[in-house]
Image (spheres, rainbow, N blue to C red):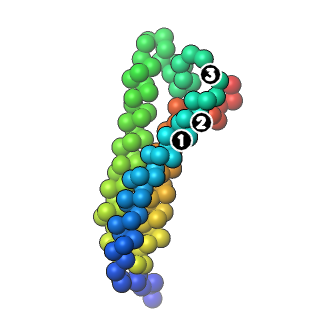
C-alpha cells in the first residue's frame, strides 16, 4: 500500500515559503556576487573569454542571467502550485532551496570560481 500524504492544512507554510524565498534568494545571490566582485580580476568575466573577439560579452552575460532568472522564477512559481497540505511541506522547502541555489549559482558562474586557469 502506498504512503498516504497528510492533507491537513499548512496555509502558513504555503504562504511563508514562497515569500521568504522571494526575499532571501536574491539577497543571498547578491551577497555572493558582492563577495565575488571583491576578488581581484581584470578584464571581462571568464564567461566572456570566447565572446570578446566578436564583441558579444554583453549578450553572453545577459543570456546566462536570463537562463538562471527564468529557471529560478519558474521554480518559485511552482511553489504556489503545490497544494497547501502539511504532507507536502518537505517538497515545498526542497523546491524553495533548489530555486535559491539556481539563483546563487548565477554569480558563481559569472565569476567562474571553479575554473582551473
| Relative side of 13 to 49, left or right | left
For the point 38% across and 60% down, the residue is 18
Give the Cα separation between the discs numbered 3 and 1: 18 Å
- In the image, residue 12 sits, relative to residue 22, either above or below, namely below
> Mark 3 — residue?
41
The N terminus lies in quadrant: bottom left
Residue pictured at 45% horizontal, 68% vertical: 91
Mark 2 surroundings within 10 Å by alpha-carbon count, few (fewer than 14), some (14 through 19), many (20 or more): few
In the rendering, at what x and y percent does residue 32 appear? Answer: 56, 40
Q: In 3D space, how far apart are the residues under numbered discs 3 and 2 (Cα atoms)? A: 12 Å
Q: State yes or no: discs 2 and 1 in contact (Cβ < 8 Å).
A: yes
* Left or right for 41, reference 91: right
- State the count of labels: 3
Residue at the spot of label 1: 31
Q: Earlier in the sequence, mark 3 or mark 2?
A: 2
User: Which residue is at the far bottom?
Assistant: 1
**Badge 3 or badge 1: first in the primary sequence:** 1
The structure residue drawn at horizontal position 41% and vertical position 73%, both measured from the top left corner, is 88
Nearer to us in this view, 100 or 46: 100
Spot occupied by residue 95 in the image (x, y as percentages of width and height): 44, 60
Give the residue drawn at x 39%, y 53%. 22
Residue designated by label 2: 35
Question: Where is residue 96, by image quadrant?
Answer: bottom left
Tell me residue 69's x, y (percent): 39, 42
Q: Is residue 109 visible?
A: no
Amino acid at each position: 500500500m502506498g504512503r498516504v500524504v497528510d492533507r491537513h492544512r499548512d496555509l502558513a507554510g504555503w504562504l511563508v515559503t514562497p515569500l521568504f524565498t522571494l526575499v532571501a534568494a536574491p539577497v543571498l545571490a547578491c551577497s555572493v556576487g558582492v563577495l565575488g566582485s571583491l576578488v581581484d580580476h581584470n578584464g571581462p568575466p571568464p564567461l566572456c573569454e570566447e565572446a570578446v573577439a566578436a564583441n558579444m560579452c554583453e549578450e553572453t552575460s545577459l543570456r546566462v542571467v536570463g537562463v538562471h532568472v527564468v529557471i529560478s522564477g519558474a521554480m518559485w512559481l511552482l511553489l504556489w502550485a503545490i497544494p497547501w497540505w502539511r504532507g507536502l511541506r518537505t517538497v515545498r522547502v526542497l523546491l524553495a532551496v533548489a530555486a535559491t541555489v539556481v539563483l546563487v549559482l548565477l554569480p558563481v558562474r559569472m565569476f567562474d570560481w571553479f575554473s582551473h586557469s
